[in-house]
Image (spheres, rainbow, N blue to C red):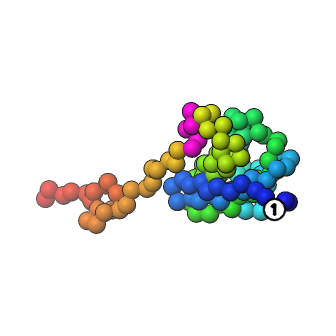
Amino acid sequence: MSKDFNYATGRRKNAVARTRLYEGTGAITVNGKPYEDYFPRKTLQMIVQQPLKLTKNLGKFDIKVNADGGGVAGQAQAVRHGISRALLEVDPELRPILKRAGLLTRDARKKERKKYGQPGARAKFQYSKR
């Protein structure tokens, strides 16, 4: 792999994806594995490819991703966010396309914290009248 690449970080819930875009043939590697092996579900693979298909860059870049934290779905969405941001560094003219699809916005939804005096975030302990 060549030394010059475009770097971006994608985030979703507790997942963080550090993404590197190299000029290449279209190989996507997540944590040292092909993305088809790392994300076995077709929906997750589709999520990862979304920014590349949208910008018509599917076979143009080799992508190396270091994904960490969260679950597989959160990591897939973090990878999508990272790829979108890295594509923006390659070509700033892709911004309107990616922005319209909502791929540049970091999804800020996270798990709500558990409160004291309750078994969960919103659930209450069972109330007994007598």
Q: Quadrant of residue 6?
A: bottom right
Task: For residue 74, say whether it is visible.
Answer: yes
Task: For residue 41, say whether it is visible.
Answer: no
Q: Is residue 115 above or below residue 6?
A: below
Residue at 79% across, 47% down: 61
Residue 51 in the figure: left or right of residue 102: right
The residue carrying mark 1 is 3
Quarter of the image where the N terminus is located: bottom right
- Residue placed furthest toward the front: 92
- Residue placed furthest toward the left: 130
Q: Amino acid at mark 1?
A: Lys
Residue 20 in the figure: left or right of residue 59: left
The residue closer to the viewer here, 17 or 100, is: 100
Q: Residues within 10 Å of mark 1 (few under 14, many from 20)?
A: few
Residue at 71% across, 46% down: 90
Q: Is residue 102 magenta?
A: yes
- Residue placed furthest toward the bottom: 116
The residue closer to the viewer here, 90 or 74, is: 90
The residue closer to the viewer here, 90 or 113, is: 90
Query: x, y percentage for residue 67?
Result: 65, 60
Q: Is residue 98 magenta?
A: no
Query: x, y percentage for residue 33?
Result: 78, 59
Query: x, y percentage for residue 80?
Result: 64, 47
Quarter of the image where the C terminus is located: bottom left
Magenta extent = 99-104
Q: Is residue 68 above or below residue 110?
A: below
Query: x, y percentage for residue 127?
Result: 21, 57
Q: Quadrant of residue 122?
A: bottom left
Q: Quadrant of residue 16?
A: bottom right
